[in-house]
Amino acid sequence: MPIQLKRLLILGVVLFSVFLLLKYLMTPDSFGQYGHYRGKALEEVASLPAKYVGSNICNDCHDSIVTIKNEGTHSGIACESCHGPGFKHIEDPENEKMVRPGTREFCAHCHAFNKARPGRAITQQNIKEHNPGDKCAECHNPHQPQL
Amino acid sequence: MKNTKENPSRRNFIKKTGITLGSLLVSSALPPFNAVLFAANKPTGKGIWYGIGIDIEKCIGCGNCAKTCKIENDVPPEPFFFRSWVEQYTIKNDGTIKVESPNGGIDGFTQSVPDNEIEKSFFVPKMCNHCYKSPCVQVCPVGATFESPEGVVLVDEKYCIGCRYCVQACPYGCRYIHPTKHVVDKCTLCYHRLKKGLNPACMENCPTKARISGDLNDPESEISKFIRIKNVYVLKPHLNTGSKLYYNALNQEVR
């Protein structure tokens, strides 16, 4: 073997071992546990806190309101859809209050007339003509809105 | 040099080239190397395999999904960072299409086209399609984005180098670079909630239950029934992304 090739070969072997060493040092422990990614990342994503706690927890204290809601047309709607996330409120119910939306605009998010809304899915109102100026909750109980 | 018709060195060259190329082609289809053909995990048919269903006939465009997603996942408030958003499609009588998504639909929608000019109009909620042949996963140079064993496409934000390849690769526009973390961010199908036995925030808080998710491997799950009963369609099927977000009543105009 010519000397030039021999030197190149030695250089190649050295570079390759440096590459292997670096790969060993720089690859995180759990890399490749499940696939071509860091296995611990799964746990890290899964350990994030949930902010919306679910209507079952609301039912523990506010069962009378939940019962009223479940008898009306808003029965399928989760409490936190309107009242916001409950993760602080369940820890400190006295000081951390839930949102109590009451504006016409809030109800209009779902109920204002819009041709894009499927008519069968929801009751729609022209909010400019339907008792303008009045709050929706003056006539409609938000938990049981049908009159 | 003697000029003969038979040239063994050329024949050998062609023979060797043929053998090399042929064996490369065959081996690329064999299991250990078939990354060339199937870059992501093949569905195993075992365990939980999440799919999503969105019923456009039920979507009322309230924007609750976009709003709750931002709160649940600390998505930056600027109106161009979204993991989940809603688009209002309006097809006019003259055939032109207007697509609007003011602040992703969080502040609600108003119809900007006069009613007498509308041929039809509908809402299309959008989010990560959690593809099983995800273009975004295939292009990641460091293995920071991946499919979980449950078929959820996730990002390892400690490992992401913020190179933006995946943002470019996603044909659905579902990724963005987080303005303060400087890594990519996307819908996780609320993986942290699924693991705690809760529904994803957007589905939990959808007032008309227009969006559902569940196990595609369980034939009795809500999502499997949804796919069986409804005429479902995925976005951009020609791209062969293996999208697992199934829309009912999707118009051909939707991109």
Image (spheres, grey):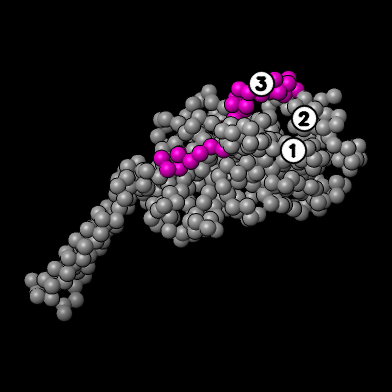
Q: Quadrant of residue A30?
A: top left
Whether residue A129 is visible, yes or no, is yes
Spatial distance from mark 3 to mark 1, Cα to Cα? 20 Å
| Nearer the camera: disc 2 or disc 3 | 3
The percent coordinates of residue B133 (x first, y second) are: 46, 45
Q: Decide whether the magenta segment is chiefly helix, strand or loop.
A: helix
Q: Amino acid at mark 2?
A: Pro
Q: Amino acid at mark 3?
A: Asp
Circle 3 sits on which residue?
Answer: A63
The percent coordinates of residue B229 (x first, y second) are: 61, 27
Q: Which residues are magenta?
A: A43-72
The percent coordinates of residue A27 (x first, y second) are: 30, 53
Within-10-Å neighbours for mark 3: few <14, some 14–19, many 20+: few
Q: Chain of mark 3?
A: A
- Quarter of the image containing the N terminus of chain B? bottom left
The percent coordinates of residue B56 (x first, y second) are: 68, 38
Q: Nearer the viewer, residue A119 or B27?
A: A119
Spatial distance from mark 2 to mark 1, Cα to Cα? 10 Å
Circle 1 sits on which residue?
Answer: A101
> Residue pushed farthest front?
A94
Q: Quadrant of residue A119?
A: top right
Q: Amino acid at mark 1?
A: Pro
Spatial distance from mark 2 to mark 3, Cα to Cα? 16 Å
Find residue A142 and name its label.
2
Q: Chain of mark 1?
A: A
Label 2 residue SS:
loop
